[in-house]
Image (cartoon, grey):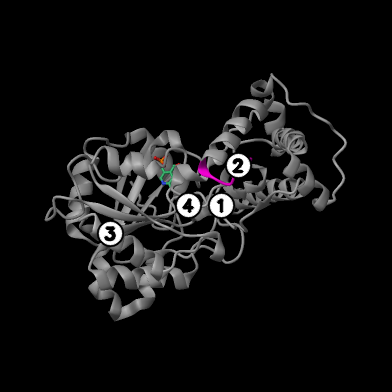
Amino acid sequence: MATPSSFPPHTTQGMCCVLLRAAPFLQHGQSLSSSSNVRTWLTWRSRPPGCRFDRDLKWRTGAEIVPVHCTSANGFRVTRAALDDAYRRAQKRRLRVKGVLITNPSNPLGTTAPRADLEMIVEFVAARGIHLVSDEIYSGTAFGEPGFVSVLEVMAERGAAAADVSDRVHVVYSLSKDLGLPGFRVGAIYSSNAAVVSAATKMSSFGLISSQTQYLLAAMLGDKDFTRSYVAENKRRIKERHDQLVDGLREIGISCLESNAGLFCWVDMSHLMRSRSFAGEMELWKKVVFEVGLNISPGSSCHCREPGWFRVCFANMSAKTLDVAMQRLRSFVESTTNGAAALRRAAVPARSISCPIAIKWALRLTPSSGDRKAER
Ligand SMILES: Cc1ncc(COP(=O)(O)O)c(C=O)c1O
């Protein structure tokens, strides 16, 4: 099969790309280095619900994950101090840190990592002699400035200085998000590390990608015109739906972290909580799920330390469905004291459709084929 060296648009020269049936990155009993009994990873911005990294990396392998705490004070950007702090916490627990795991663009923030932050993270792993895994599964979704920068570009710019760390920086990717093909179960690891490539190659034999899938993908990804226009159109649609969500939330007094990628927004709903605590966050989450009928993810499920942040996905629904969701949220906000006050401050008139919180929400959330056609 043709390796997707041009899709996503990464710098992959000199790297080996192993295509895998997309699965948890480390399989049972495996680690990037076999020299340690305890495998510990520092992770930045892991994802809800239930923290996928916990599920993918921890439960099956026994690896420990130590969150790198970021705060709203700097837009949840990772800092050297936060990395050092996570490293120290791991050491206190007598864990031997094997590497840093990041998602760029971030899930759940929907932001791309600035080049300077990536350089700082590479410096950190170089200084500590550990690995860096960059999960770039959302790289093709970056629709706004600053654009997406792959850690591989940062490595290429390091020139000779990259030599000390080049076999400890790895990228994982899959076709699930950018191409909307999660059912194909196709992923890739880009690495220059012979041990990683060899382990991944062996792993891949337990979950081979069918010849039919390979044939189809080779034809599709080999068509440069198609991939170029597909990615451009996909970004345009994601941005459109993103703007619809952000504008709709602003109108009801709810703000979001400014974002430029991903299929979701990181939304501050702390003023709607009865108490500014994680208990208050869970209480609000339950209300939004069971009373409003919207499935959003509480920040605590991805180790966010500030109660009141939620991840709201916007890309899996039609414009009409998102409108219905906004109307329901407006009704809910109006019913809460703080929410109503924020709504008055937002001072934007309500839209004309009034939609009561309906019991048949599940049916209305399912886009009809008509909706889908209208979106094209
Ligand atoms: C950051 C991140 N990495 C990996 C995955 C897993 O994707 P796949 O469907 O290819 O297993 C997801 C899926 O939600 C994700 O958000």
Q: Which residue is drawn at 28% across and 80% down?
A: 160
Ligand 1: does it lie within 8 Å of the C-beta at label 4?
no
For numbered disc 2, what is the local secondary structure?
loop
Q: Which residue is drawn at 56% across and 57% down?
A: 142
Magenta span main SS: loop
For numbered disc 1, what is the local secondary structure?
helix
Name the residue beneath numbered marker 1. 231
Q: Name the mark nearer the viewer: 2 or 4.
A: 4
Q: Name the mark nearer the viewer: 1 or 4.
A: 4
Range shown magenta: 274-278
Name the residue beneath numbered marker 2. 315
Q: What residue type is labelled 3?
A: Gly
371 relative to 192 in the view: left or right: right
Q: Percent x, y for residue 228?
A: 55, 55
140 relative to 144 in the view: left or right: left
Q: Residue at x 54, y 36 (%)?
A: 282
Name the residue beneath numbered marker 4. 305
Q: Name the mark nearer the viewer: 3 or 4.
A: 4
Placement of 343 over or under 194, stated as above or below? above
Name the residue beneath numbered marker 3. 99
For marks 2 and 3, give the CA distance: 31 Å
Q: Name the mark nearer the viewer: 1 or 2.
A: 2
For numbered disc 3, what is the local secondary structure?
strand
For residue 296, say whether it is visible: yes
For numbered disc 4, what is the local secondary structure?
loop
Q: Give the number of the disc on residue 363.
A: none
Among the two numbered marks 2 and 4 on one chain, the one whose residue lies closer to the N terminus: 4
Q: Which amino acid does label 1 sit on?
A: Val
Among the two numbered marks 1 and 2 on one chain, the one whose residue lies closer to the N terminus: 1
